[in-house]
Amino acid sequence: MSQPFYVSPEQVMKDRADYARKGIARGRSLVALEYEDGIVLVAENPSRTLFKVSEIYDRIAFAGVGKYNEFQMLKIAGVRLADMKGYSYSREDVTANSLANAYAQTLGQVFTHEMKPYEVEILVASVGTEDSDPNELFHILYDGTVFDEQGFTVLGGQSEAITEVLKRDYAPGLTLSAAIRLGARVLSPPDAAPLASAQLEVAALQRSRQRRAFHRIKGTELEALLAAEAG
């Protein structure tokens, strides 16, 4: 009787992580930036119907990169969880922190116990209703690791190179126009012109909006913001 091949747990985890990272790196990047009135999410996405950025609840947004069908399943599960919790208890009980923890548990379970890990990175972003309420950016990796980011975060693609540029060029208190232009510039290839509106998907969580803070920015509004002069 032949003996089964033995593979150490460390090697199994490494192989799964390498597989997930390679799949995510093949996709286009996404950046989230805090600006003066909340958070803006900018993604390279030429599709007009397949969205990377969506609303989950009143003041919470979801963004994903990697395999579209996998992060869409996660988005739908998050919407259902938020709706159920808000209906059963109160709307204030639905928080980005609790959703990020739920996502982390799901991704960690899949990574550890399933044959194929999810090839995704996701973001749960939240903006408060008062000036004293901080913004929240929870960046969640394919293996369930959660990062509580401040200022900005980058998902997928060439994330390391883009992060280095943002460390140099990002500053707190940007206007919406300046934040979108910065996002379009860092997502473009080196030495190339910033991405145009037709190549971008942009949405914002705006603190000044009542109850539902999510606002998708497109068409002539996006073109005007990209064309605005700095300052």
Image (spheres, rainbow, N blue to C red):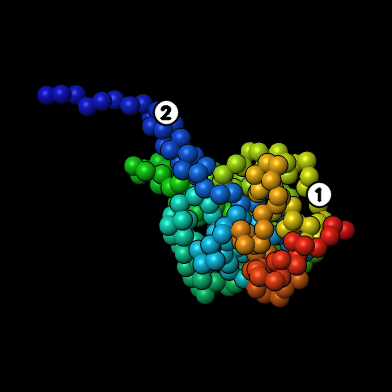
Task: Mark 1: give few (<14), some (14-19) or many (20+) Cα within 10 Å.
Answer: some
Pick the quarter of the image with the C terminus. Answer: bottom right
Answer whether residue 26 is visible to the viewer in this image. yes
Q: Nearer the viewer, residue 117 or 89?
A: 117
Answer whether residue 126 is visible to the viewer in this image. no
**Residue 48 relative to residue 19: left or right:** right
Provide the secondary structure element on which disc 2 rests: helix
Q: Which mark is residue 10?
A: 2
Q: Nearer the viewer, residue 159 or 34?
A: 159
Which residue ends up furthest to the left in the rendered image? 1
Residue 118 spot, x, y in % from top left: 43, 47
Residue 210 spot, x, y in % from top left: 71, 75
In front: label 2 or label 1: 1
Q: Which mark is residue 171?
A: 1
Provide the secondary structure element on which disc 1 rests: loop
- Identity, as a three-letter code, of the amino acid under mark 1: Ala
Instruction: Give the residue at x 53% y 52%.
Output: 65
Pick the quarter of the image with the N terminus. Answer: top left
Residue 43 spot, x, y in % from top left: 61, 55
- Identity, as a three-letter code, of the amino acid under mark 2: Glu
Q: Which mark is residue 160?
A: none
Q: Is residue 72 above or below residue 30?
A: below
Q: Is residue 211 above or below residue 102?
A: below
Mark 2 and mark 1 lie on one chain; the one further toward the N terminus is 2
Do labels 2 and 1 touch, CB within 8 Å? no
Query: Residue 203 falls in which quadrant of the image?
Result: bottom right
Instruction: Give the residue at x 66% y 48%.
Output: 188
Instruction: Give the residue at x 29% y 25%.
Output: 6
User: Marks 2 and 1, how far apart in space?
Assistant: 40 Å
Which residue ends up furthest to the right in the rendered image? 231
